[in-house]
Amino acid sequence: MKTRPRISIFFALLAMLVMLPPPSFAASQSKQLLQQGTVMGFRHYAGKEVWDRLRIGQPLTLIREVGNVHDSQAIAVEWEGRKLGYVGRADNVDLARLMDNGAAVEARITKLERSRRPNNRVGFEIYLPLAEPVQVIDPLSPGKLSPQ
């Protein structure tokens, strides 16, 4: 008799766990990883000044520099308004095209390493936020929703 309540509790907990979405479900559905890289030109900009304040996970701002005389596809990488460098030339063509077409991209710091090579010090990931599905009320069938 004593085992029966334990079994009931076990199955109730199991049922609740099965009904929960995986922990990463919401995060994996909200943005798409576009690329990973390291900040190029780090030693030429504010990197040394802000190094001790940088933290993994912090957001970075990507600024499209259409008028850059050295690279027409240039994308600057900033942290709290301070330029750290650029997305590498080999990796910026598709990203520049997306940004030129109005895509809102997000970036964050993924690696901080005191490397002898300044271009390996700050790693980042760039994401494309995904739109949430929209439910629209069907005017022909009041009360009925249709996905868009």
Image: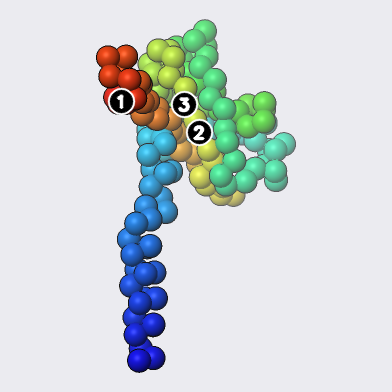
Pointer 2: what residue?
107
Q: Let me know if residue 101 appears in the view.
A: yes
Q: Is residue 13 left or right of residue 51?
A: left
Label 2 secondary element: strand
First reached walking from the N terminus: tag 1 or tag 2: 2
First reached walking from the N terminus: tag 3 or tag 1: 3
Pointer 1: what residue?
144
Q: CA distance from mark 1 to mark 2?
A: 38 Å
Q: Are marks 2 and 3 in contact (CB under 8 Å)?
A: yes
- Residue type (three-letter) at the residue carrying disc 1: Lys
Image point 54% across, 41% down: which residue? 109
- Residue 137 position by quadrant: top left
- Residue type (three-letter) at the residue carrying disc 2: Ala
Q: Residues within 10 Å of mark 2 (few under 14, many from 20)?
A: many
Image point 43% across, 43% down: which residue? 27
Which image quarter is the N terminus in? bottom left
